[in-house]
Amino acid sequence: MSDRKKAPVLFEDSITALVSDSGVLRYRLTTNQWFVYDKADTPYWSFPEGIRFERFDINYNIDAAIECNKATYFSEMEKWHLEGNIRAQNLSGERFYTEELYWDQRNEIVESDKSITIIQRDKKIVGKGFRANQTFTQYSILQPTGIFPLEEQEETESGSSENP
């Protein structure tokens, strides 16, 4: 390859990475493809087949998760760009669905200008654009379009007991 800025310095296939904090397993990252472009003008990691992040509670149960069809991580800026069929679940069990979001790890902010659907225990909230902390526990929808009560049957059919 003649231009090192366009070639990945590392390629990994079928990766599961575990991350610990103070000796305690806290996170799992799973992806089919991981490319590292550290010679690019703006160094980045590419996950063209998507990525899944899972957070573990003290008993190693998944208590929060996010996944998408495609992701890019800009390593020097500590920013993520997630795209396509994004599904997230926070610690309260609320589920979030959108097509694109930006995650700024330094400032611990997640935001998007795309449509968002949030499924809570008893209602579905729909709107366009949102901003949240990185745990999705505090959030606002910029242009809400509706709040719809969920019937018990409707909640069960939407897969409320499953992780994203």
Image: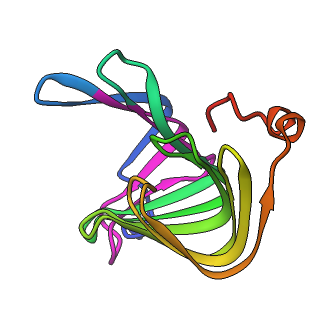
**Residue 158: quadrant of the picture:** top right
Camera-nearest residue between 100 and 160? 160
Which quadrant is home to the N terminus? bottom left
Camera-nearest residue between 104 and 94? 94
Rendered location of residue 163, percent (x, y):
62, 32
Residue bounds of the magenta highlight: 26-55
- Residue 112 seen from this side: no
Rendered location of residue 136, percent (x, y):
45, 56
Q: Left or right of 32: which side holds 26?
A: left
Q: Main secondary structure of the magenta part?
A: strand
Q: Is residue 62 above or below residue 91?
A: above
The residue at the point 89 percent across, 34 percent down is 153
The residue at the point 80 percent across, 61 percent down is 148
- Residue 74 seen from this side: yes
The residue at the point 63 percent across, 46 percent down is 49
**Residue 14 among magenta residues:** no
Q: Residue furthest left?
A: 22
